[in-house]
Image: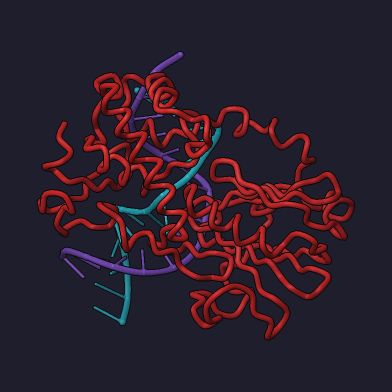
Chain colours: A red, B purple, C cyan
Amino acid sequence: MPELPEVETVRIGLSALLPGRAIAQVEQNWDKSFPNTSADVRQFLIGAKVATVARRAKVLLIELDSKYSLVIHLKMTGQLVFRGKSGEHFGAGHPNDSLIGALPDRSTRVTFTFTDGSQLFFNDQRKFGWIRLLPTAEVPQIDFFKKVGPEPLSTNFTWKELGERLRRRPNTNIKAALLDQTVIAGVGNIYADESLWGAKIHPSTLVKNITDAKIKKLYASLTAVLKIAIEKGGSTDRNYVNVEGKRGSYLNFASVFRREGQPCLRCGTTIIKTKVAGRGTHICPRCQKL
DNA sequence: CACTTGACCTGTCCGC
DNA sequence: TGCGGACAGGTCAAGT
């Protein structure tokens, strides 16, 4: 589910809510969602205060004042929903806009309760997501962070670097290369399809057959799509919600994702859905030719 | 080694 | 309505 824009939206939400709050209690009903608890919980989690909330790739980092951090991956259906103690409302808009009802519910895997009575719920229908508690200094050493590629929206990420990194996978198709987190961080199925449409590249095109001119276009469309998606609060296809339980609106502005059967916004040709790199893939068959 | 496929899970939707 | 199968936004491990 959540890709870079969705995780960034959650990070922004948590950054406004969590710092300064101290954890009083942690409950879980599915051990695999938060495997390393026991002794660590008591020593470095209970009583610890949230310092900052950061993001790298699709991973959230909640840094505590105990020199430990909560490392969270939402995978396909993870949600982090914050609730004040009864009656207390946080965030913009009406609380009834939340897609999530009373919590905990049947998809709640972990519940963090803060000393002021507020709560953070980790919901995860498919149970693929996870939370780890690690010493903050060791976080960059986990396998995923050692291998993950650069942040596409960082100021020093250029079209040339995108090209160099993509071309380490010359014989695979461009969609699989974009989805490969060791090539570039944070791109998933939605924004791969959106950015390839923007650059008029067929997702099955082998990387070695893509020109520099096309790489430049892809860089421009990818960075633009990610920025717009963050502005729109991400994409809600099925499960994704922000920390208030509300949907993101990017799909109202999407060019191809979930628009099969509808006209291409450039040429009017009907958008089709196929399968590339094992994933549902949306293309304009006229704008994106092999 | 480069690349692709299956597994991890639950829930929903579609065709018979 | 019931039931089987396909599919869903991610990432690893295992397979070719």
**Residue at screen point 59% across, 45% down:** A59
Quadrant of the rendered image containing residue A258 = bottom left
Residue A41 lies, in percent from the top left, at 83, 54
Q: Is residue A29 visible?
A: no
In the rendered image, the vertical position of residue A187 relative to residue A158, given as above or below: below
Camera-nearest residue between A218 and C8: A218
Residue A85 falls left or right of residue A218: right
Residue A65 lies, in percent from the top left, at 84, 50
**Residue at screen point 36% across, 34% down:** A219
Q: Is residue A209 visible?
A: yes
Mark count: 0
In the rendered image, the vertical position of residue A248 relative to residue A43, given as above or below: below
In the rendered image, the vertical position of residue A3 relative to residue A126, given as above or below: above
Quadrant of the rendered image containing residue A57 = top right
Residue A287 falls left or right of residue A37: left
Residue A40 lies, in percent from the top left, at 84, 49
Camera-nearest residue between C5 and A257: A257
**Residue at screen point 60% across, 57% down:** A12
Camera-nearest residue between A1 and A219: A219
| Residue at the outermost bottom position | A87
Residue A96 falls left or right of residue A146: left
| Residue at the outermost front position | A155
Residue A145 lies, in percent from the top left, at 62, 33
The quadrant in which the N terminus of chain A is found is bottom left
Quadrant of the rendered image containing residue A290 = top left
**Residue at screen point 75% across, 34% down:** A138
